[in-house]
Amino acid sequence: MIKWFLDKSSKIPLYLQLKDLIKYYISTGAIKDSEQLPGVIALSKELDINFETVRKAYKELEKEGLIFTRRGKGTFVILPSASLSGSRERLASEFQADPKKELRHAIKRLLREGKKQEDVRILVDEVLKEASPEPTDFFVIFTECSEFQVKEISKALEERLRVNVKPVVVANLKTEIDSLVDQEYKLLAIVTTGFHLNEVRKIIDDRPVDIQILITQMSPETRFRLSSLSRDTKFGFICRDEDSISVYTDMLKTELGEDIKISSCLIADEAMVDAILQTVDVLLVTPSAYEVIKSRTPGRLPVFNVFDSIDPMSLQIVQAHISQKIEASFT
């Protein structure tokens, strides 16, 4: 059961809180692909807020390609499946287009119009120069609470986005942002996982900095290894956030089966951590707990990071957004 709540004493606008809350539930798997969201009126009554606040949050999420509305049917989540229509289909087509074919078509058209080959070559060189910003001109910050996760995801982002990606642990984000000063215009976005959206937004406060979300999930390899274990396997699960234990546990049961035997605790509960490490067959941990727990785990005990993969469609959405911002800066 999804818990809908907003902090009405916060300076953060309610529609942004609701938008971030939905993103958080998507990132943890609490709200799944194709799942219908509550109606605007129903959710506004449940939260005791104006229905326009809910409508605005939904519109923002729809612009980002995370949800879509079918007239007369309702509003639905469209991650991580790439099979649905709307903005996801449009986005997928952008990445499936053959750039070589498009360029060939444009050159043939110019030649048919009477342009000489040398003129076309000069034109192509000019366009290439205009469209190729220096890699040091722009950068992205990726932030998370786990130093291990920050480094790993930053590498993946840099390869995909083809801009500099600066890894910053959430605890150091405010200091990093304060130090930007006149470089702030070169910061394309701060990228984080759904687990830290609210925290990052509070740190950014009223600065005009774009925040993008990456959805992390269990990789197919990890899912296959875990699902192939005996049904009598005793699982242990350790994380940092008490509010997340039920969400994560439900997600793991969805991934591995409702009948799995699983014991959960917070990393701060030393006695319970020790008990779990001594009694379970397999240990599951979140990225923020992985580094600490790994060093304490007996050698016999397999340890799995349950969010060891980036959802490819959420990565495409971030890539498209960053590309658009770079393109816009040259127009």
Image (cartoon, rainbow, N blue to C red):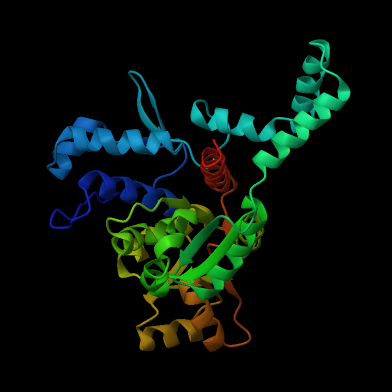
Residue 73 in picture, x, y percent from top left: 35, 22
- Write down the quadrant of residue 251 in the picture: bottom left
Which quadrant would residue 135 be assigned to in this image?
Answer: bottom right
Residue 210 in view of the camera:
yes
37 w.r.t. 228: above or below: above
Q: Residue at x 57, y 43 (%)?
A: 323
On screen, residue 104 versus residue 309, left or right, reads right
Left or right: 18, with 294 as reference point: left
Residue situated in front as seen by the camera: 104 or 218: 104
**One can see residue 233 in this view:** no
Q: Quadrant of residue 105?
A: top right
Front residue (pair 130, 308): 130
| Viewer-side residue, 76 vs 297 | 76
Q: Position of residue 241 (x, y in %)?
A: 34, 70
Q: Residue at x 26, y 51 (%)?
A: 3
Q: Position of residue 64 (x, y in %)?
A: 44, 38
User: Is residue 124 found left or right of 241 in the rendered image?
Assistant: right
In the picture provided, is 223 more to the left or to the right than 147? Answer: right
What is the total number of numbered labels drawn onto the structure image?
A: 0
Residue 194: x %, y % from top left: 42, 56
Please determine whether, in this image, residue 50 is positioned above or below residue 220: above
